[in-house]
Image: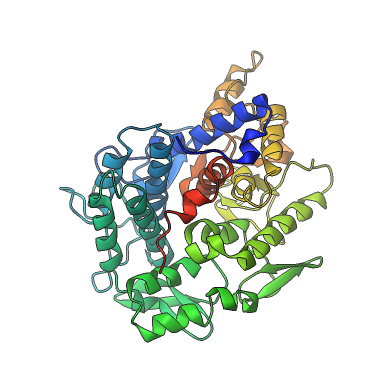
């Protein structure tokens, strides 16, 4: 069994019990969202419906592969390696009746495909979602390299089956194409954002390409991090995109931290990451009547409440919906956040012990909505009679819960030792 961090060791027993339960459930939600025949993962877990959903998210499938690495390390799943192998075979079209939709010219994947057949479900060919899949595959390849070396072989095959040159829109300004259509990159997005991962994988696969080299080294390499666009919250510099008047959802900062080796190890990025965490926390403190343990500007569905799916950020958060998984994602730089999660659990969302003898329907819906623990919630509605029950947990957003709790208990070395360096 892997070693534990000092932060975890020093927890009181009652908090440690909560952490262990939430940590295990962060994996269990992925397992509940996995298709047993194809190994593909659903876009989200339907809290009040049937699972797995028919719609696979290619990005969620990448995170699902990482979840299997966690389950293997923790000895939660003795078949984790076999499951990872099945998932990769499905992604490469090696499972009968399942051919995940891809761009014929470049190999990039459709964002949403049918869980059974791989048919494109009216979605775009996405560079970031493909990158999340490939990042998860490479991670699994490193983790299982001794137990099941074929996983690393298939992960490399997946990486090399894609022509990454199409992602480069402006190599001098860090502009990356979000979508591929008929072999051409479209919808350019200027830096900074989670597309750092796209540039990193392009360099890993095609290091000899000059445009790909320039895209990374002119914009995203460690020596260029302080030159990325920034916005100040009070006096705190936070990375942002080309619009220097807008903040980014906190998940944008979290994905590179856990999934790009240069960013996971960089003291410069860690400083910016700490700043993003601090800005998120401080902005919530400006809201009246909200306790200090409620924070986290993340993305997720708000079905039945405000908008539908929304990526919340400091200056754009309809209804101030909080995302507990964002708190988890910042635990490597703010370990005290574990007590914020515990307070939320203990005082408001005791998901494993909640009862309501006066309203059996409320008890059923509440326990179903939070079956796998804390996720997205409305503080305004949490204690009201007409409570809001989240109906879906989007897996790609939930990934921060898995990553953060893994790093909190086992250390960031779990990630840095399994990320493939370009």
Whether 17 is drawn above or below 257: the answer is above
Please tell me whether residue 178 is drawn above or below residue 281 in the rendered image: below
Q: Position of residue 12 (x, y in %)?
A: 69, 28
Judge whether 209 appears above or below 238 on screen: below
Q: Residue drawn 24% across and 62% down?
A: 157
- Answer yes or no: is residue 205 visible: yes
Which residue lies at the image location 56% right of the left edge and 33% below the top edge? 22
Q: Quadrant of residue 50?
A: top left
Of 336 and 289, the residue lying toward us:
336
| In the image, farthest residue toward the top | 357
At which x and y percent is residue 152?
28, 55
- Left or right: 338 as drawn, with respect to 87: right
Q: Position of residue 2 (x, y in %)?
A: 47, 38
**222 on left or right of 181:** right
Q: Residue at x 48, y 52 (%)?
A: 415
Residue 304, image quadrant: top right
- Asked whether residue 195 is in view, the answer is no
**Front position in the image: 53 or 344:** 344
Question: How many circles with numbers are drawn on the protein?
Answer: 0
Q: Position of residue 329 (x, y in %)?
A: 59, 49
Quarter of the rendering occupied by the C terminus: bottom left
The correct choice, above or below, for 211 with respect to 97 in the image is: below
**The N terminus lies in which quarter of the figure?**
top left
x 40%, y 63%: residue: 131
């Amino acid at each position: 069994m892997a070693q534990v961090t000092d932060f975890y060791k020093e927890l009181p027993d009652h908090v440690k019990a909560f952490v262990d339960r939430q940590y295990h459930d962060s994996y269990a939600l992925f397992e509940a969202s996995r298709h047993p025949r194809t190994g593909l993962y659903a876009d989200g877990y339907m809290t009040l419906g049937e699972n797995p959903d028919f719609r696979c998210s290619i990005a969620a499938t990448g995170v699902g592969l990482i979840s299997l690495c966690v389950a293997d390390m923790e000895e939660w799943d003795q078949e984790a390696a076999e499951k990872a192998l099945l998932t990769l075979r499905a992604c490469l079209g090696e499972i009968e009746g399942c051919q995940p939709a891809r761009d014929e010219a470049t190999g990039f994947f459709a964002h949403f495909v049918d869980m059974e057949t791989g048919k494109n479900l009216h979605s775009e060919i996405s560079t970031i979602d493909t990158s999340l899949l490939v990042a998860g595959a490479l991670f699994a390849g490193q983790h299982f390299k001794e137990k099941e070396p074929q996983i690393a072989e298939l992960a490399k095959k997946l990486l090399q089956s894609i022509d990454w040159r199409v992602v480069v829109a402006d190599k001098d300004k860090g502009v990356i194409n979000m979508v591929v259509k008929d072999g051409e990159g479209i919808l350019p997005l200027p830096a900074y954002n989670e597309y750092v991962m796209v540039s990193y994988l392009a360099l890993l696969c095609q290091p000899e390409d000059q445009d790909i080299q320039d895209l990374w080294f002119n914009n995203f390499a460690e020596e260029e991090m302080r030159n990325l666009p920034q916005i100040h919250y009070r006096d705190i510099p936070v990375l942002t995109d080309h619009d220097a008047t807008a903040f980014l959802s906190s998940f944008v900062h979290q994905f590179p931290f856990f999934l790009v080796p240069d960013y996971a190890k960089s003291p410069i990025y860690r400083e910016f990451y700490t700043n993003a965490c601090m800005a998120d926390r401080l902005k919530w403190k400006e809201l009246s009547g909200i306790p200090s343990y409620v924070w986290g500007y993340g993305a997720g569905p708000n079905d039945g409440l405000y908008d539908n799916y929304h990526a919340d950020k400091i200056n754009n958060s309809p209804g101030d919906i909080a995302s507990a998984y964002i708190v988890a994602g910042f635990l490597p730089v703010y370990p005290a956040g574990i007590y914020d999660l515990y307070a939320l659990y203990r005082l408001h969302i005791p998901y494993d012990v909640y009862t309501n003898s006066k309203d059996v329907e409320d008890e059923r819906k509440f326990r179903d909505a939070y079956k796998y623990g804390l996720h997205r919630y409305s503080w305004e509605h949490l204690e009201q009679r007409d409570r809001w029950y989240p109906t879906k947990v989007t897996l790609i957003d939930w990934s921060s819960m898995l990553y953060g709790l893994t790093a909190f208990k086992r250390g960031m070395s779990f990630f840095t030792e399994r990320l493939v360096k370009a």
